[in-house]
Amino acid sequence: MGLEKDQEITIGLTLSSFLIAVAVAFLSLMALQDVGASNSHNELFGVIGLFSLLTSALIIDSILDHANFNFLRRIRFLNGGYTLFCLLVAGINAGIIYFYRFQEGIQLFTPSSPITTISMIFTLAFTFLKLMTKDDKHTFAPALLLTYSLAFFGKDQFFTLSNGGLLVMSILFFPVLLIIDKIASDV
């Protein structure tokens, strides 16, 4: 026995609201940690908050996929409110990386932190585009996993633009080409 479409939407929106509350709680716990405190706590709080927020957004994205919303229709959905929601989720995802690395004492947006800066920019872009495209065929999941891995485990001092940063940028650029192709076919 399956669920009716209205029941699926109600359950999806309820789960989404709950997951946003979980994300807020765990990201608040992350913010309460002292600078220089145990990174294991920050990693745990950050990962739970990040995945709660992202899961919430993916549930809403799935509902819009089933309703056959393409890129242009999503831009106009709720008078642009959905687009702002997607930007907010993407910004929070990038902000989690920023906050985590800031607590480690990393100075961001400087030539000495290219990996963190690059991964934040790509996390913002990949998250936003994942939520704005229909049926992305799992293009974004590996790309986001790569940017999260670089952000949380990459060491900036090993990747300057001269000794590997350009390689990392070119590896991250490949999913961008796939995304551009996806958006072009979605419109």
Image (tube, rainbow, N blue to C red):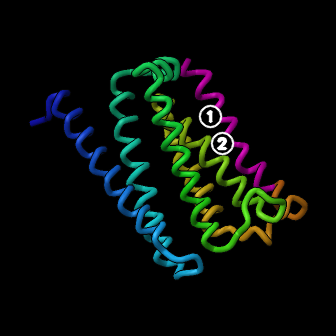
Above-or-below relation of 19 to 7: below
Name the residue: 55% across, 41% down: 139
Q: In the drawing, what numbered circle is on residue 175?
A: 2
Location of residue 85 in the rendering, given as x and y in whole percent from the top left corner: 45, 35
- The part of the chain drawn in magenta is 167-187
- Whether residue 119 sits left or right of residue 132 in the image: it is right
Name the residue: 52% across, 77% down: 34
Tag 1: amino acid:
Ile
Quarter residue 97 falls in: bottom right
For label 2, the SS is helix
Location of residue 8 in the rendering, given as x and y in whole percent from the top left corner: 21, 34
Query: Contact, CB < 8 Å: mark 2 with mark 1?
Result: yes
- Whether residue 20 sits left or right of residue 102 in the image: it is left
Q: Is residue 63 one of those drawn in magenta?
A: no
Name the residue: 62% across, 41% down: 125
- The residue lying furthest to the right in this view is 162
Tag 2: amino acid:
Pro
Q: Nearer the viewer, residue 4 or 124?
A: 124
Q: Is residue 177 one of those drawn in magenta?
A: yes
Above-or-below relation of 134 to 96: above
